[in-house]
Image (cartoon, grey):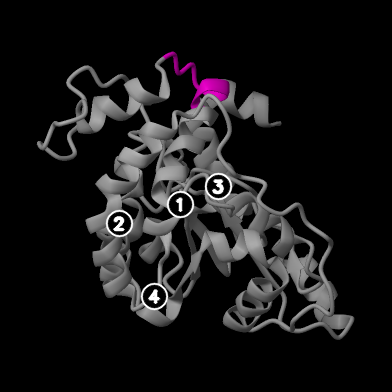
Amino acid sequence: MNIALERALGRRAARQVRGKLLGRTHLLPDFIIIGAARSGTTHLLGQLNAHPSVLEGPAETHFFDTHRYTYGVGWYRLRFPPNRARRHLYHEGLHPVLTGESSPSYLSHPNVPARVARAVPRVRLLVLLRDPALRAASHWAWCLRQCGETRSFREAVEAEIGPPGDTGGIRVPVDKRVGDPLVVRRGIYQPQLERWRTHFPDDQLMVIQSERWFGDPPVVMAEVCDYLGIPRRDELPRVMRNRNKPHEPFDPEVIARLREFYRPYNDELAEYLDMDLDWNEQT
């Protein structure tokens, strides 16, 4: 049916029609993990999906930050469990029952906060913020594997902040290619958070330092459960600690330079969040 509809109407129109017809039979997300990329978002979603009060939601729908937004909210709803799945758990005595997604590029995309606010104004937002120097290194390594990155880590960093001694600050590379992730810019978190806080009150946005999540997931998971209003789990599956530590060929000199570059941004962010961040002292 889907193939026939797409042949008759075209892909976008077919998905719009299907979403309008069937979307209301599916849930909207109660929470969205919006980023930052390479900061533990997939792991957090996995732990939430394993919670008995959470119906498994999708990873990286990229609805609000890509052409998929033109398919309509009905198409987005079809990514989530049907309404009957929640009713079934209600009948079993479980309440509340939530579902959600994780698309870590949402945090940095300038158009996403307003789009999310229009579609799901009461959604709870979860943000994981990782030491931006190590986040940049991890993001670059991911791009090597997934999106055809050919530059060295040093070249990718210098494309955004120039060579050592350059005091010009952050810039968009003059030779920016389609799909370039701008791995350094992604780690300047405060402007990204301010965009979200323009559209959502503070009590709908929970900021978590990724190092806490990597270091003690059960404690942080309990805090997340409290924030979402679901019961804490008695115990969680054992997880691998320090799973995202940097590895070769990350250049330690580039990491050190990034740490110095991010220092004033980190200091301002710590004051903005009233949170004790120790990224400047990481070794």
CA gap between label 4 and label 3 equals: 38 Å
**Which residue in the structure is indicated by mark 3?**
75
Answer with left or right where residue 55 lies relative to residue 102: right
283 relative to 203, above or below? above
> Within the image, what quadrant is residue 55 found in?
bottom right
- Residues drawn in magenta: 143-150
The reply to whether dot 1 and dot 2 touch (C-beta < 8 Å) is: yes
Q: Is residue 147 magenta?
A: yes
252 relative to 225, above or below? above
* Location of residue 103 in the rendering, given as x and y in whole percent from the top left corner: 52, 49
Q: Secondary structure at mark 1?
A: loop
CA gap between label 1 and label 3 equals: 25 Å
CA gap between label 1 and label 2 equals: 10 Å
The reply to whether dot 1 and dot 3 touch (C-beta < 8 Å) is: no
CA gap between label 2 and label 4 equals: 17 Å
Mark closer to the observer (2, 4): 4
Q: Is residue 283 visible?
A: yes
Between discs 4 and 1, the one toward the N terminus:
1
> Within the image, what quadrant is residue 95 found in?
bottom right
Answer with left or right where residue 39 lies relative to residue 277: right
Between discs 1 and 2, the one toward the N terminus:
1
Q: Quadrant of the N terminus?
A: top right
Task: Please name the amino acid that badge 3 sits on.
Answer: Trp
Between discs 2 and 4, the one toward the N terminus:
2
Q: Secondary structure at mark 4?
A: loop
* Location of residue 48 in the rendering, given as x and y in whole percent from the top left corner: 70, 64
16 relative to 149, above or below? below
Between discs 1 and 3, the one toward the N terminus:
1
CA gap between label 4 and label 1 equals: 17 Å
Mark closer to the observer (4, 1): 4
**Which residue in the structure is indicated by mark 4?**
275
Q: Nearer the viewer, residue 162 or 228?
A: 162
